[in-house]
Image (cartoon, rainbow, N blue to C red):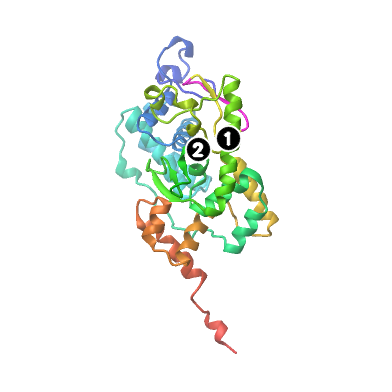
């Protein structure tokens, strides 16, 4: 059987019949369909499909329907002992595999025997105000604007890159974050310092969109079933990505060739280079600016509930981690410093 997609038929998966002989949907296509029906994020879909593939190939391409708790435990043990993955990564693998059994194969698994691993709560890496300024100062163009937004709004990198033109509200001085983690919309602050450069970026997107339309392109992908409800909305300027990619991609499902947003790896690489150029030894990433946003707001006296809303945390317990950052960073004097 070739590497990649796996057909749902057991016989087909172990090579007894050629793939072309069956019209049954492939297993991973069924997984994708089940995930999209539940409106999970694209990142979750990619992660789950990847873990399911790795689980199958770990067991010599056996069909998942022929396996169960013992094989799942063996794979998770391999990840923990041999690969030394973190607890969160191990739990992500478990969630993806259990999703397959529960929602696609409809096979009962001993869930209690496969309890998630207790995650270790790590103190997040945070830039000081000076460090954040130094990193941003070594960026240019669109990457600089994106990272400035991360630090100025507390958005996740995927949320920032998924912004559409219509999500920036200059009149209300706010940015609407659509379909954040957990499919929740929220509102965050629009940094006044970025208003001129954001307006300039929107004008560039408008010019690019006009050029695409003149070449018979210019339609973008819409979330959920909006294309069926509003067939022409994809060509409207407001729906265009705020940070469009340089080239086009082709979506097999919608048969649409369109500009997706800038890939997050582009920003990750630029931040990594900027951190190094700034002489900062911390393992900084785009997400570090989200942590820095929350920590610096808390340090400035804003209440924890306000910060929770801006970050889009479901529970204030998640936001409380930043109080630990401040406790470790300031306010405590070492007894060693009292020795003459």
Q: Position of residue 116 (x, y in %)?
A: 37, 47
From the viewer's perspective, is residue 329 above or below residue 250?
A: below
10 Å neighbourhood of mark 1: few (<14), some, or many (≥20)? some
Relative height, residue 277 to residue 252 (above, below): below
Query: Disc count in the image?
Result: 2
In this view of the protein, can residue 94 be seen by the observer? yes
Mark 2 near mark 1, Cβ–Cβ under 8 Å? Answer: yes
* Region rendered in magenta: 246-254
On whether residue 42 falls in the magenta region, the answer is no
What is the distance, in whole Å, between disc 2 and disc 1 at their CAs? 8 Å
Q: Quadrant of residue 321?
A: bottom left
Q: Is residue 249 magenta?
A: yes
Residue 1 vs residue 93, the one in the foreground: 93
On screen, residue 210 versus residue 140, left or right, reads left
SS category of the residue bearing label 2: helix
- Which residue is situated farthest in the top direction here? 21
> What residue would you read off at disc 2?
165
Q: Residue at x 50, y 57 (%)?
A: 293
The residue sitting at 51% across, 25% down in the picture is 219
User: Whole-percent x and y of residue 136?
Assistant: 62, 54
What label sits on residue 205 in the rendered view?
Answer: 1
Residue ID at (50%, 27%): 220
Quarter in which the C terminus is drawn = bottom right
């Amino acid at each position: 059987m070739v590497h990649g997609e796996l057909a749902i038929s057991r016989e087909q998966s172990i090579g007894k019949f050629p793939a072309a002989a069956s019209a049954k949907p492939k297993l991973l296509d069924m997984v994708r369909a089940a995930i999209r029906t539940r409106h999970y994020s694209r990142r979750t879909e990619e992660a789950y499909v990847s873990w399911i593939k790795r689980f199958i190939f770990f067991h010599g391409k056996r069909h998942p329907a022929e396996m169960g708790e013992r094989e799942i435990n063996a794979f998770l043990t391999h990840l923990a002992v041999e690969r030394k993955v973190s607890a969160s990564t191990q739990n992500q693998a478990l969630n993806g595999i259990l999703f397959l059994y529960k929602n696609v194969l409809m096979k009962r698994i001993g869930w209690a025997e496969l309890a998630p691993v207790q995650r270790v709560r790590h103190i997040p890496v945070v830039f000081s105000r000076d460090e954040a300024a130094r990193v941003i100062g070594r960026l240019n163009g669109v990457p600089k604007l994106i990272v400035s937004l991360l630090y100025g709004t507390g958005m996740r990198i995927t949320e920032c890159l998924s912004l559409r033109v219509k999500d920036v509200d200059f009149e209300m001085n706010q940015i609407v974050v659509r379909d954040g983690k957990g499919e929740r919309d929220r509102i965050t602050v629009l940094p006044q310092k970025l208003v001129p450069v954001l307006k300039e970026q929107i004008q560039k997107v408008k010019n690019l969109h006009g050029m695409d339309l003149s070449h018979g392109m210019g339609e973008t992908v819409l979330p959920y079933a909006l294309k069926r409800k509003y067939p022409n909305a994809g060509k409207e300027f407001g729906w265009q990505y705020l940070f469009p990619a340089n080239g086009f991609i082709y979506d097999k499902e919608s048969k649409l060739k369109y500009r997706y947003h800038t890939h997050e790896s582009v920003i990750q690489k630029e931040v990594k280079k900027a951190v190094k150029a700034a002489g900062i030894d911390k393992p900084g990433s785009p997400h570090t600016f989200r942590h820095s946003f929350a920590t610096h707001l808390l340090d400035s006296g804003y209440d924890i509930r306000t910060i929770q809303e801006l970050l889009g945390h479901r529970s204030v317990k998640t936001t409380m981690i930043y109080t630990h950052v401040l406790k470790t960073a300031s306010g405590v004097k070492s007894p060693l410093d009292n020795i003459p």
